Image (tube, rainbow, N blue to C red):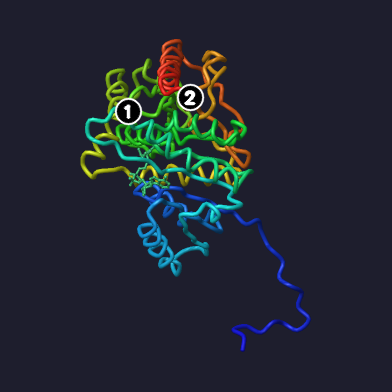
C-alpha cells in the first residue's frame, strides 16, 4: 500500500535543483539564532548541527524540527560526529569557550585555539569544497586560525567581522535621520570590536553623500553626532550582553544574510573579515584577517571594494591590522 500512485508510464523523478547544505558548529545562543533565521529564509535544503554537548544538541534539533509544518522543507540533522557535516556548501562556526571572570582576552583565545583545532580539520576533511564562515570571538584572529588549520584558499575562509557592527551603525543613523536602514549605506571596517573604524567619508542615504551635505548644512548630522554614533555602535554589544547575557537576534540575521549572499550568488557587498594584507596600505607581511567591504557569492570572497578612504581612516585601519598582528605573534601562531 503506497501513499501515492504514480502516473502510468511516468519517468523517474528528476532532481530539480542543486541540494544546498549548511553546517552550524556550536549550538549555543548564537548558533541557534543563525540556524533558525536561515530556516525562515529558504536558503538551505539541509542543515547539520554539531555541538560538544549531546543532550542540548538533540533538544535544539528536535525543537527546530517541530516547526516543520510552518517552514519551507529543510532536513535538519545533528550529531557530535563530524561525519554528519559531509558535503556542506557552507560551514558556520560559532563554537567557543565563554570568558571566565578575570580571564584575559589572550587566555580566552588560547582556549578557543584548542577548540578550533578539534573543529576545523574534520570540517575541512568532510567538506573540502565548502566555504568556512567564522563567527566565534575574537572573530578576526579565529578566522586567521581557521584559514591556517583548513589549508583552504583565502577566498573560502571568511569571518562575520563587522557585518553586524555595520548594521548597528546603519540602524542608529537611520533612527537619527528617520529613514529606512536599508537606504543607509555605511560601513564599519577593521577589527570587530573596540578598534573598528567607521567610514564617515563614504556614508550615503538614498545616494546622497552625507558628508558633503553636512558641509552644505542641509542634513541633520554633526561631527559630534557622527562620533557619538561610532561609540554607540561599539558600546551597544556590551549593553546587550550586560542586559540579556548574550547577543543573538541581530547576529542571527546578519549571518543568515551572509549565507544568502554566498549561496545564492548575490554578488552583494558586505563588510566581512578577509585576508587583508596588501589592501589599503596594509603591508604584505602582515597576514591578518580584518573586515573590508567585499563582494561575496558562490566562490566566497569575489573581490574587495576599493572605496576612497581619508588618510585618517586608512591610518586607523592599519593600526587595527597591527593590533591583530601583535595578538597573533603573542599567540605563537
Ligand atoms: P554559547 O551559548 O556559550 O555557545 C557556545 C557553544 O559552543 C555551546 O553550545 C558549546 O557547547 C559549544 N562548544 C564548545 N566547545 C565546542 C567544541 N569543541 N565543539 C563543538 N561545540 C563546542 O555562546 P554564544 O552562542 O552566546 O556565542 C558563541 C560565540 O559567538 C562567542 O564566541 C561569541 O563571542 C561569538 N559572537 C560573535 C559575534 C560576531 O559578530 N562575530 C556576535 C555575537 C557573538
Q: Quadrant of residue 68?
A: bottom left
Ligand number 1: quarter of image = top left
In terms of secondary structure, where does tag 2 sit? Answer: loop
Left/right placement of residue 1 relative to residue 236 reads right
Q: Position of residue 199 (x, y in %)?
A: 42, 22
Q: Position of residue 283 (x, y in %)?
A: 54, 13
Residue at x 48%, y 44% (from the top left corner): 92
Q: CA distance from mark 2 to mark 1?
A: 16 Å
Residues 21 and 84: in front is 84
Cβ at disc 1 under 8 Å from ligand 1:
no
Left/right placement of residue 103 relative to residue 199 reads left
Quarter of the image that includes the N terminus: bottom right
Residue at x 24%, y 43% (from the top left corner): 245
Callout 2: 10 Å neighbours few (<14), some, many (20+)?
Answer: few
Cβ at disc 2 under 8 Å from ligand 1:
no
Lower sequence index among marks 2 and 1 = 1
Residue 251 sits above or below residue 44 on the image: above
Callout 1: 10 Å neighbours few (<14), some, many (20+)?
Answer: few
In terms of secondary structure, where does tag 1 sit? Answer: helix
Residues 67 and 98: in front is 98
Q: Which mark is residue 333?
A: 2
Looking at the rendered image, the disc whose residue lies closer to the viewer, 2 or 1, is 2
The residue beneath circle 1 is: 105
Q: Position of residue 117 (x, y in %)?
A: 48, 38
Residues 235 and 127: in front is 127
Residue at x 29%, y 27% (from the top left corner): 104
Extreme residue in the top direction: 311
Q: Position of residue 15 (x, y in %)?
A: 69, 63
Q: Quadrant of residue 94?
A: top left
Amino acid at each position: 500500500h503506497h501513499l501515492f500512485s504514480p502516473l502510468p508510464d511516468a519517468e523517474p523523478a528528476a532532481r530539480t535543483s542543486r541540494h544546498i547544505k549548511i553546517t552550524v558548529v556550536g549550538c549555543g545562543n548564537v548558533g541557534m539564532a543563525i540556524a533558525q533565521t536561515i530556516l525562515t529564509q529558504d536558503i538551505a535544503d539541509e542543515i547539520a548541527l554539531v555541538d560538544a554537548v549531546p543532550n542540548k544538541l538533540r533538544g535544539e534539533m528536535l525543537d527546530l524540527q517541530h516547526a516543520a509544518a510552518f517552514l519551507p522543507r529543510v532536513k535538519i540533522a545533528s550529531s557530535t560526529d563530524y561525519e554528519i557535516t559531509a558535503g556542506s556548501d557552507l560551514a558556520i562556526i560559532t563554537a567557543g569557550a565563554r570568558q571566565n571572570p578575570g580571564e584575559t582576552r589572550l587566555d580566552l583565545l588560547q582556549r578557543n585555539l584548542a577548540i578550533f583545532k578539534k573543529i576545523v580539520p574534520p570540517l575541512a576533511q568532510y567538506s573540502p569544497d565548502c566555504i568556512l564562515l567564522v563567527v566565534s570571538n575574537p572573530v578576526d584572529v579565529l578566522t586567521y586560525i581557521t584559514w591556517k588549520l583548513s589549508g583552504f584558499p583565502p577566498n573560502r575562509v571568511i569571518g562575520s567581522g563587522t557585518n553586524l557592527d555595520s548594521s548597528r551603525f546603519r540602524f542608529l543613523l537611520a533612527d537619527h535621520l528617520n529613514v529606512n536602514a536599508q537606504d543607509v549605506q555605511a560601513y564599519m571596517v577593521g577589527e570587530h570590536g573596540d578598534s573598528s573604524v567607521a567610514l564617515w567619508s563614504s556614508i550615503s542615504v538614498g545616494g546622497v553623500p552625507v558628508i558633503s551635505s553636512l558641509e552644505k548644512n542641509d542634513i541633520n548630522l554633526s561631527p559630534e553626532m557622527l562620533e557619538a554614533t561610532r561609540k554607540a555602535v561599539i558600546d551597544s554589544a556590551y549593553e546587550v550582553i550586560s542586559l540579556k547575557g548574550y547577543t543573538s537576534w541581530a547576529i542571527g540575521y546578519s549571518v543568515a544574510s551572509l549565507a544568502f549572499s554566498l549561496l545564492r550568488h548575490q554578488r552583494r557587498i558586505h563588510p566581512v573579515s578577509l585576508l587583508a594584507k596588501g589592501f589599503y596600505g596594509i603591508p604584505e607581511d602582515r597576514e591578518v584577517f580584518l573586515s573590508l567591504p567585499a563582494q561575496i557569492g558562490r566562490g566566497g570572497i569575489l573581490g574587495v571594494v576599493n572605496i576612497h578612504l581619508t588618510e585618517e581612516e586608512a591610518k586607523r585601519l592599519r593600526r587595527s591590522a597591527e593590533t591583530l598582528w601583535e595578538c597573533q605573534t603573542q599567540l605563537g601562531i
